[in-house]
Amino acid sequence: MQHIDTINMFLQMTGCTDGKLMLYLTYFEFLITFYYLIAAYLSIVHSEQSVTIQLFALLCMLIECVILLNIAFRLYHRDHIREMHRYSRRLGIPDSYRSKINIITKYHLIASNVFVIFPVTYAILYDSVRVGDPFTYPYLDVLPVHADNLAIYAFKYLAYAISVYIAHVELCFINTTFIYYVGVLKHRIETIVQTIREAVVDNDEQKFKYAIIQHQKLLSYFSTMKKVFSKPILLSMSFNAIYFGLTTSFVIQAIRGYINQVILSICIASSAAAVINITIYTFYGSELMDLHDKILHVLFDNAFFYVSKSFKSSILIMMTRVTIPLKFTVGYIFTINLNLLLKVSE
């Protein structure tokens, strides 16, 4: 089964395929994001704007820092991603996972366009916003030009739009590939379950041993998957916690009447997007923990009184392995599952 187009594009961005054009795009994203990070830092240090504008610049700097680290993690784990790609190349994923990946891709496409179009629409419709107001990108005002004419203002807005699209491309990369590789695990486990059923019905010990071998490869694949995604997910969780705190300060500023409405709306929308990201990680983390239950059910629901002693030993080996759930623990701090989402919500 062929990879989903979105996944193919992201695999090309990691350098896992023969084409290198998309890999160069990753390097371009890294350089642009690094520039935005430095610009945001300089804007905070040297800006004479209000505290609200400086807080927004701090949020921008945090976002750029997270994006930069995600790109660095992807390049660092290129060999691990290539290893997972080889494992999943001949496998498919359930159709439900395919549709969910397409939905997540469309969501990021729509969300990025909303974040780009909404501020300029606000500027056009409301006379209170003038050309030169740093209501969307204060960190770009550190450039040695002033946004006092429409052409320069449009150029700086284009720079802001590029940063928004890069941010959503990177978020889409993490979200869709995480869902995809969970789907690969689910498909492989369903295959192992079917092999075990056939081995039990046919009393075929060799087929059961083959299932054990496939399960061992699956555990190795899962270990590699944790190496690739644990750092980005931990970073995302930590960033969202900080982001929520800073957004709260914006709400307080809005109540006091000191903050631009566009900045507040962008921050609230970004917070909603952060909740969506956390939900994706925790939901599919719980899916991982439930996957082994399918193998447990097929093992414990069958009687093995009439199989050979060596066959029983193989069954015990498989039972021992699958009693350990596929826990996705990040940073030795917390396990990604729905219980974590409930704790965050509290």
Image (cartoon, helix red, strand yellow):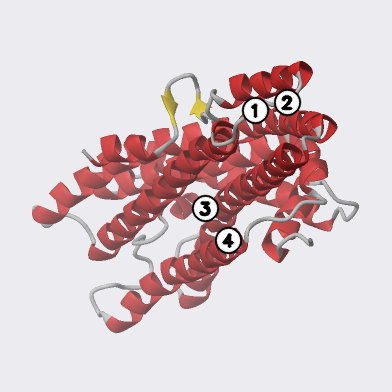
Q: Earlier in the sequence, mark 4 or mark 2?
A: 4
Residue type at mark 4: give it: Ile
Q: Earlier in the sequence, mark 4 or mark 1?
A: 4
The answer to whether residue 192 is above or below residue 135 is: above
How many neighbours does mark 3 have within 10 angstroms: few (below 14), some (14-19), or many (20 or more)? few
Tell which of 315 and 272 is nearer to you.
315
Badge 4 vs badge 1, beta-carbon distance below 8 Å: no
Gap between marks 3 and 1 measured at Cα: 74 Å
- The C terminus: image quadrant: top left
Mark 3 or mark 1, which is nearer to you? Answer: 1
Q: Secondary structure at mark 3?
A: loop
Reading the image, the residue beneath label 3 is 143
The answer to whether residue 307 is above or below residue 47 is: above
Residue 147 x %, y %: 44, 65
Q: Earlier in the sequence, mark 2 or mark 3?
A: 3
Could you tell me if residue 62 is visible in this image? yes
Residue type at mark 1: give it: Phe
Reading the image, the residue beneath label 2 is 307
Gap between marks 4 and 1 measured at Cα: 40 Å
Q: Secondary structure at mark 2?
A: loop
Mark 4 or mark 1, which is nearer to you? Answer: 1
Badge 4 vs badge 2, beta-carbon distance below 8 Å: no
Could you tell me which residue is drawn at 54 percent across and 24 percent down?
323
Reading the image, the residue beneath label 1 is 304
